[in-house]
Amino acid sequence: MKKNNFYTSLTLFTLIIAVVLFIVKNIQQKFVIDYLTWGALIYFLLLTIVIYKISYSALSKKNEIFLGRIYSAIGLRFVFSIFPLIIYMIFVSERQIPFIIVYLLLYFFYTAFEIYFLVVNLRPDSKK
């Protein structure tokens, strides 16, 4: 897993999601995509970069340290992903279900993206 390859793929992945959101916004007028949705997209982009750096730093360590860091990164991703959603649910009186759905989908897409890059990187180790 080379850093440039990850950042290039992450940028492309984010642009694809942004285009899909833009298309959905223009086609489906009932589906509200506002500044919160774009903010969530940027938030997950930045969160993925931070979690990637934590995971990447563990690759050259022993297996016990590697697994601890990976599990910690997954836990951090979950906590830092669910916390803004809880704040949104508490403080916004008119909750928008489309935003909540998009937010959760972004969480799952970016988590799957990170796991994919982690698994691709671990394949050469499995042959040893």
Image (cartoon, rainbow, N blue to C red):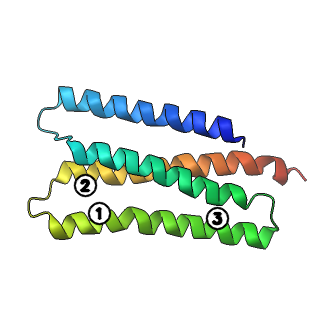
Q: Is residue 77 above or below residue 103?
A: below
Residue 100, label in figure: 2
Res 14 seen here: yes
* Residue holding disc 1: 85
Percent x, y of residue 44: 42, 50
Is 43 positioned to the left or the right of 123 in the image?
A: left
Q: Say whether disc 1 or disc 3 marks the residue closer to the N-terminus.
A: 3
Percent x, y of residue 100: 25, 55
Question: For the residues marked 1 and 3, what is the alpha-carbon distance in whole angstroms?
Answer: 23 Å
Is 81 positioned to the left or the right of 74 in the image?
A: left
Q: Is residue 11 above or below residue 86?
A: above
Question: For the residues marked 1 and 2, what is the alpha-carbon distance in whole angstroms?
Answer: 8 Å
* Mark 1: amino acid: Leu
Q: Give the secondary structure at mark 3.
A: helix
Is 79 positioned to the left or the right of 32 in the image?
A: right
Q: Is label 1 in contact with label 2 (beta carbons under 8 Å)? A: yes
* Residue holding disc 3: 70
Percent x, y of residue 21: 30, 34
Res 111 seen here: no
Q: Give the secondary structure at mark 2.
A: helix
Circle 3 residues within 10 Å: few <14, some 14–19, many ≥20: many
Q: Is residue 45 above or below residue 71?
A: above
> Going 28% across and 30% down the picture, which residue do you hit?
22
* Mark 2: amino acid: Ile
Quarter of the image where one finds residue 20: top left
Residue at the extreme left: 94
